[in-house]
Image: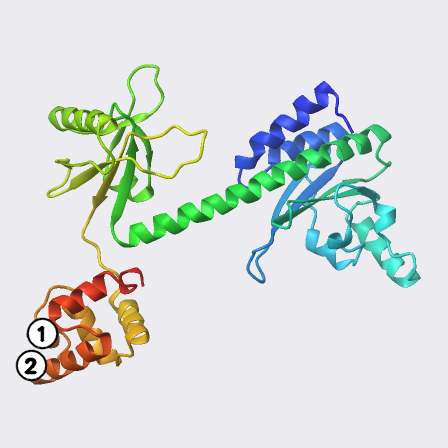
Amino acid sequence: MSLSFATQRELLLPLVEGIHESPPWGGFLRQLVARTYARRAFLIITLANSAPGQEPAVVHVAAPRAATEPPLDFRRIEALRLHPYGALRPGRVYSLDEMLDYDRPAQLARQRAELDEMNIRYGRFLRVTAGGAADAWLLLVREREDFTASAVSALSGVGPHLSAALKTLAALIEQRLQVALAQSALQRQGVGQVAFDATGRVMAADPQAEALLAFVPEPGPTAGRRLQLVPAVSQALEAACAELAAGPAGASVPLALGTQAGLWMLLRKADLPLSEPCAYPAATGVLRIQRREDAARARRALAAIYGLSMNEAALAHQLSLGESIVEAGRSLRLTPETSRSYSKRIYAKTGTSSQADLVRLVLTGLAPFA
């Protein structure tokens, strides 16, 4: 069903913009309440991969005349055992009467009584889906008179657009999860990253880089930021980005930032697998601070992966900190003889032949991510 120009402006623009709200679509829901003269409304969003017991996202909106009323309790409404939400045909608008249990008079009486307590006399339900990745249920309610045909028409017309927006939101949530996975792994290792254009302007920075570096707004009308550096380092950064932009694949330039003792950034020609359309960076900068994983978790990981005892795993992890066998044993209150005996068993179980080989195995394995 087509929507009027006014309805498109009032509903569809907030629907597109609302994808980035948290929780999403509060503005859209407020506009929908105003457009349909609903008293209150809520939108329930569930994701297919949600953990058991994870509460769905619920957006509640009330018209100004109902601003002092308590929000709709979707759990209380759910407990009334109305027509199961999951069985609603996507895209079809259901009236409240269609949701009631007319086959069981006692249940019907209970449903009506509780709905009356919540000041719900009339309602409209709409379910939309995102191809199995997510579901959303929209409920609009009124107290004194039923929804008009134009209000129902507006709700029906917005259904396909809400479904498309829900699919976009589901894809965006997956992208956010991928970003969070990458950032979490890098942050555990003390690694931060920055993307630069060919002039040294910052295009993006991860949380670790944001914490380690200072940024200043780009001067002039151009949007963006730059690193706050002394002039000589800032000029060197700009020159390196320009060089990398024109250079061959795999080229890199180390740069001393001078903001902290020993803080360096390794600039590389960008080789990120981005999909078009995109603003492709000229260079990526990687910086790292000294950070090691939690010792107890790392030891448990080493014990599980290589079949080590906890004492052996503790010694193996201690050796990866750069200590000698005797020093590592002393840290764990082991005698030199016991430490050497443990080390031989560790080498045998891990398939390594020396302390250096063992340290390589620990640092390139899963223990640093424990």
Q: Disc 1 marks which amino acid?
A: Ile
Q: Closest to the observer: 328 or 23?
A: 328
Residue 177 point in image, percent of width and height: 46, 48
Q: Disc 2 marks which amino acid?
A: Pro
Residue 366 in the image: above or below residue 140:
below
Circle 2 is placed at which residue position?
A: 336
Residue 165 in the image: above or below residue 137:
above
Residue lying at 14% horizontally and 69% vertically, measured from the top left:
319
- The answer to whether 306 appears left or right of 70 in the picture is left
Residue 305 point in image, percent of width and height: 31, 73
Among the 4 quarters of the image, the one containing residue 339: bottom left
Q: Closest to the observer: 91 or 297?
A: 91
Callout 1 secondary element = helix
Residue lying at 7% horizontally and 70% vertically, measured from the top left:
324
Circle 1 is placed at which residue position?
A: 325
Task: Using the rendered image of the protein, determine whether residue 123 is visible from the camera's viewpoint.
Answer: no
Tags 2 and 1 in contact by the CB under 8 Å rule? yes
- The answer to whether 43 appears left or right of 368 in the picture is right
